[in-house]
Image (tube, rainbow, N blue to C red):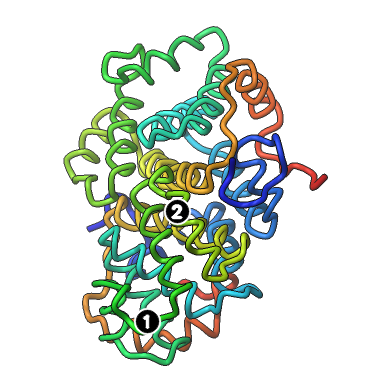
Amino acid sequence: MAHIKVPEGVPGIRSLVMFRPESGQHLYALAQVLLRGESPLTEAERELIAAYVSSRNDCMFCMSSHAAAARYLFKDKRQVVDFVLDDYKSAPINDKLKALLTIAGKVQKNGKEVLPEDVVEARKRGAGDREIHDAVLIAATFSMFNRYVDGLASFTPTDPKAYEEMGVRLGEKGYVLPNKS
Amino acid sequence: MAHINLPEGLPGIRGPMAFRPETAKPLNELAEALLRSENSLSRGDRELIATYVSSLNDCFFCQNAHGGIAQHYLQCDMPFIDAVKKDFQVTPISEKLKSLLAIASSVQKGGKHVKEEQIKKAKSLGATDVEIHDTVLIAAAFCMFNRYVDGLGTWAPQDRQVYVERGPRRAEEGYINFDLYK
C-alpha cells in the first residue's frame, strides 16, 4: 500500500500524478521533451538509458515500464534491451551507447562520479555535447522518478503483461497525463 | 571546465539551462510548483528541505543557492542552515519539520529507504498526505538537480556570501521567466 492515499489500483507514477497534478504535469512534460523531443539519440536509446538507470536504482516499476517502452521502440532488435540490462558492456550495441551508459551509471551514483576521462571516451566513440547532456539529464531525471515512485511506495504490478501494455502505450503515445477520475 | 561546451560565465544549473532551453522549461516549472506555489509548508521550509538534500548529495552549488534563499525566507543566518545540515534533530525547528527531513534523508539514499514508521511519525506530528508527497518529491527532484549540475561538471562561485546576497532577489524572481544572465 502506498504511504499516502492515492487512487486505488493505479500503478506507479500514474497514481502519484493523479494525486498531485500540479507537479505531475511538469514531470510528464519533462519526460516528453527529454525522451521524445528532438535529440541525436533515438527514442529507443533514450528509453534504454532510462531503464538501465532505473535497474541500478532497484526501481522495479520504472525499470519494467521503460524496458517495455524500449523493447517496443527497438522493434525487431528488442532483445538488445535484455542484453543491456543484464550486462551492457557485452551487449550488441555500439560503443557510443556503451560510453553513454557508463556516464549514466556514474550519474546514478552521484554527479561527481563522472570524470573527464569518461567524457573523453564518449567523444572518442562519437558522442557530442548533446548526447552527453541528454545522457546525464536522463540519468538524473530517473534518479528522481525512481525515488518518487518507491519513496511513496506506489503500487508496483508484478504481471509482465501489464508492463507490455504500458510499453506499447508509451511507445505510441508518449507521456500523456492521465485524466483525474 | 564543464564536460560540455556551455555558454560562458553562467554558474551551476544556469549553463545547462542555457544550453538546452526545451528541457529547462519543465525543470523550472517543476521547481516553481514545488518550492513557491501555495502550500501548507512554508517556502522557507521547502527551500530548507532542498538545501538539506543537496548537502547530503554534496552539491556545492545547489546547497548554497537554495541555502541562500532559505536564509532569506526563514530570516536566519548561515550558522543556522549549517546546523540543520549537520544534525537537524538538535536544531530548534518544529518536530514535524524534523520528521519530514528524516523522510527526505531516506529518499536521498533511495526510495525504498523510506520506512512506514517514518511516515507514521510524520502523520502523528500533523503532516498531511500532500506535505508528505511534496517532501518526497522535493527530495527526489533535488537528487535530479544535484546530478545534473555535478554530472556536467559545472562551475560555481566559491564564496558562500554571494548566494546569501542573491537570496532575496532569487526569492522574489522565482523559477520561471527569470533572466539566466542576471
Q: CA distance from mark 1 to mark 2?
A: 32 Å
Amino acid type for the residue under numbered disc 2: Glu
- Does B63 appear above or below A34? below
Residue B67 percent location from the top left of the image = 36, 77
Kindly indicate whether the residues beneath marks 1 and 2 are on one polypeptide chain.
yes
Of pointers 1 and 2, the one earlier in the residue sequence? 1
Q: Amino acid at mark 1?
A: Gly
The residue singled out by tag 2 in the image is B117
| B75 relative to A31 in the view: left or right | left
The residue closer to the viewer here, A76 or A130, is A76
Evaluate if marks 1 and 2 touch, with contact meaning CB atoms under 8 Å apart: no
Extreme-top residue of the structure: A76
State the residue in front, B108 or A118: B108
Where's residue B15, x and y in %? Answer: 39, 62
Q: Provide the residue designation for mark 1.
A: B68
| Label 2 packing within 10 angstroms: few (<14), some (14-19), many (20+) | few
Image quadrant assignment for residue A53:
top left
Q: Is residue B140 above or below residue B7?
A: above
Q: From the viewer's perspective, is B125 left or right of B144?
A: right
The chain letter for the residue carrying disc 2 is: B
